[in-house]
Image: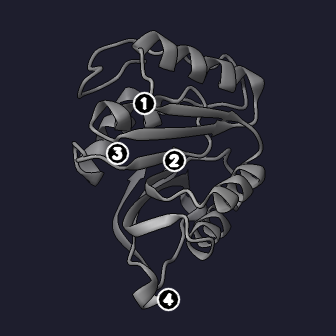
């Protein structure tokens, strides 16, 4: 696995050796960033189920200012820290905690995200709740982009203030790109 584009292009990334973590392939990562816009002009990214940290690191490489990478598994946490250190990324916060505790922490700290990456273990049916919680808590910037990857049968339906702007099937999975349209539509 490697960084596809940007500042850290072609740099290798370690992966988590675990049955419960499935790394996003380089091809799917490239497809994802082509769907949301190849480069960013700053902002804060949340990679809530970080695994190896590859998606959040890719976002940093492509111009995001700051990364919050969260994973509750120690192996994943250690690999994310190692990948970030090997690239010399200084604007990253790696948190070893359950996603619910992370959401509570972000609420307390009033942290705002411009890009949210959601690729939890399949079958948990938690993406809708996470998205709604982030909005309710005020953790989403106006026009924040949310990327949801899950099984096709877990495809989400959105209503304002959320708008699904792109959707693509990849084998058994679906990737949905969602825009948060801010409080004026709530």
CB contact under 8 Å: marks 4 and 3: no
- Kind of element beneath mark 2: strand
Labels 1, 3: front one: 1
Relative to 68, does residue 3 appear above or below in the rendering? above
Left or right of 32, for residue 1: right
- Kind of element beneath mark 4: loop
x, y (%) of residue 54? 47, 29
Q: Earlier in the sequence, mark 4 or mark 2?
A: 2
- Splitting the image into 4 quarters, where does residue 153 fall? bottom right
Can I make out residue 124 in this image?
no
Q: Earlier in the sequence, mark 1 or mark 3?
A: 3
Residue at 56% of width from left, 25% of height from top?
Answer: 52
Q: Label 2 belongs to which residue?
A: 46
Q: Label 3 belongs to which residue?
A: 32
Graded by Cα atoms within 10 Å as few (under 14), some (14 to 19) or many (20 or more), the crowding at tag 1 reads many
Q: Earlier in the sequence, mark 3 or mark 2?
A: 3
Query: How far apart in space, not on screen, are marks 4 and 2 (Cα)?
Result: 22 Å
Residue at 63% of width from left, 71% of height from top?
Answer: 137
- Kind of element beneath mark 1: helix
- Splitting the image into 4 quarters, where does residue 64 fall? top left
Q: Label 4 belongs to which residue?
A: 186
Query: How far apart in space, not on screen, are marks 4 and 3 (Cα)?
Result: 27 Å
Residue at 67% of width from left, 69% of height from top?
Answer: 129
Q: Earlier in the sequence, mark 4 or mark 3?
A: 3
CB contact under 8 Å: marks 4 and 2: no
Q: Which mark is residue 57?
A: 1
x, y (%) of residue 174? 47, 55
- Kind of element beneath mark 3: helix
């Amino acid at each position: 696995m490697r960084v596809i584009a940007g500042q850290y292009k072609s740099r290798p990334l370690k992966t988590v050796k675990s049955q419960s973590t499935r790394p996003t392939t380089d091809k799917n990562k490239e497809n994802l960033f082509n769907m949301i816009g190849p480069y960013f002009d700053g902002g804060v990214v949340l990679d809530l189920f970080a695994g190896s940290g590859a998606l959040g690191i890719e976002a940093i490489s492509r111009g995001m200012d700051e990364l919050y990478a969260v994973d509750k598994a120690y192996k994943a946490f250690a690999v994310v820290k190692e990948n970030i250190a090997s690239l010399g990324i200084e604007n990253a916060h790696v948190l070893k905690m359950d996603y619910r505790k992370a959401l509570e922490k972000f609420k307390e700290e009033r942290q705002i995200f411009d890009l949210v990456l959601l690729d939890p273990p399949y079958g948990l049916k938690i993406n809708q709740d996470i998205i709604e919680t982030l909005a309710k808590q005020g953790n989403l910037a106006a026009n924040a982009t949310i990327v949801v990857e899950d099984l096709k049968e877990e495809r989400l339906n959105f209503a304002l203030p959320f708008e699904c702007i792109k959707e693509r099937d990849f084998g058994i999975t679906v990737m949905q790109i969602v825009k948060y349209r801010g409080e004026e539509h709530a």
